[in-house]
Image (cartoon, rainbow, N blue to C red):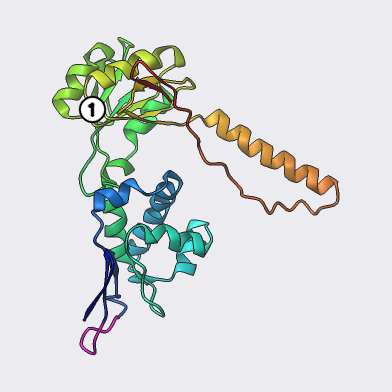
Amino acid sequence: MVSQRGRRTRVTPDADNAPTAEMPAVETTAEPEAVRAKSIPEAAVARLAVYLRVLSGLAEQGATTISSEELSQAAGVNSAKLRKDLSYLGSYGTRGVGYDVQVLVSQIERILGLTRKHKVAVVGIGNLGHALANYGGFPGRGFPVEALFDLDPDLVGVPVGGLPVSHLDEIPKVCAERQISIGVIATPPTAAQSVCDRLVAGGVQCILNFAPVVLQVPAHIEVRKVDLAVELQILSFHVARRADLAANGNGGGDSGPGGAENGSVNGHGNGMVVR
């Protein structure tokens, strides 16, 4: 039977369609998936990626179902927050059974856009760039590295991770030809903006920036900044706070959150966004 409540539909199992570990009852929404994905908070998107990593590992080990408590412990979040995050997918699991691992993996991959591959270009083949180019885990997760770029004449033309390094001047042409959608900037900060401009000119839609500099990009370009020094400073803060608590006789405990969410400051001007 199917009962309707506004825009939601719920499949009610009958005697021949009772939920099992292999086929849990799933609640879906009539809301278009693109609209649903757009409404998910960015912090929840980051946690969904963590859930996917955990679930993929469990699937490889042969697990078929998992409870919200088990998944929350493995992902390092509380179970209430996890259930809220998974509700964005339109799946609520089955009482007494939990979540079907494969179904949940498929739902998260679909929401995160992982049902198709996203070709990646790495710019700046220093120590970090070499490590990224040689990392074998990207292709299996839908992020094949398809292009490498550097300015050093000793590197241009040299294969790294099976790909020849191209010159920075070729970024727009190569990215357009190979349909690169994600660019990774691993250059010194002085070169980052110029590299960013070339990536945008080549049709790259998203940029992962490891350079400690703020980039100016058109409003339609998504930028994620990874500043390892800032992350270490945040960890230093927590270490110092716990040391202070211990010195004050509070046992060194810290009941507050153990991390900080990345924020972004968007400034609009001349069609550009500062990220």
For the record, the magenta segment spans 13-19
Above-or-below relation of 198 to 115: above
Q: Which residue lies at the image location 50% right of the left edge and 29% below the top edge?
A: 227
Q: Which residue lies at the image location 44% right of the left edge and 63% below the top edge?
A: 83
Q: Give residue 29's position: percent from left, percent from top.
A: 27, 63
Q: Give residue 193's position: percent from left, percent from top.
A: 38, 15
Which of the image's four quarters has the C terminus? top left
In this rendered view, identify the residue nearer to me: 101 or 146: 101
In this rendered view, identify the residue nearer to me: 147 or 259: 259
Q: Give residue 141's position: percent from left, percent from top.
A: 29, 46
Neighbor class of circle 1 (other Cα within 10 Å; few <14, some 14-19, many 20+) is some
Quadrant of residue 268 within the rendered picture: top left
Q: Which residue lies at the image location 59% right of the left edge and 34% below the top edge?
A: 232
Q: Give residue 192's position: percent from left, percent from top.
A: 39, 17
Above-or-below relation of 173 to 206: above
Q: Is residue 221 visible?
A: yes
In this rendered view, identify the residue nearer to me: 187 or 44: 44
Quadrant of residue 104 within the rendered picture: bottom left
Q: Is residue 265 left or right of residue 143?
A: right
Which of the image's four quarters has the N terminus? bottom left
Above-or-below relation of 25 to 57: below
Q: Does the magenta segment cover residue 16?
A: yes
Tag 1 secondary structure: strand
Residue at the front extreme of this rendering: 6
Which residue is tagged 1? 163
Q: Is residue 158 visible?
A: no
Q: Does the magenta segment cover residue 252?
A: no
Q: Is residue 170 left or right of residue 65?
A: left
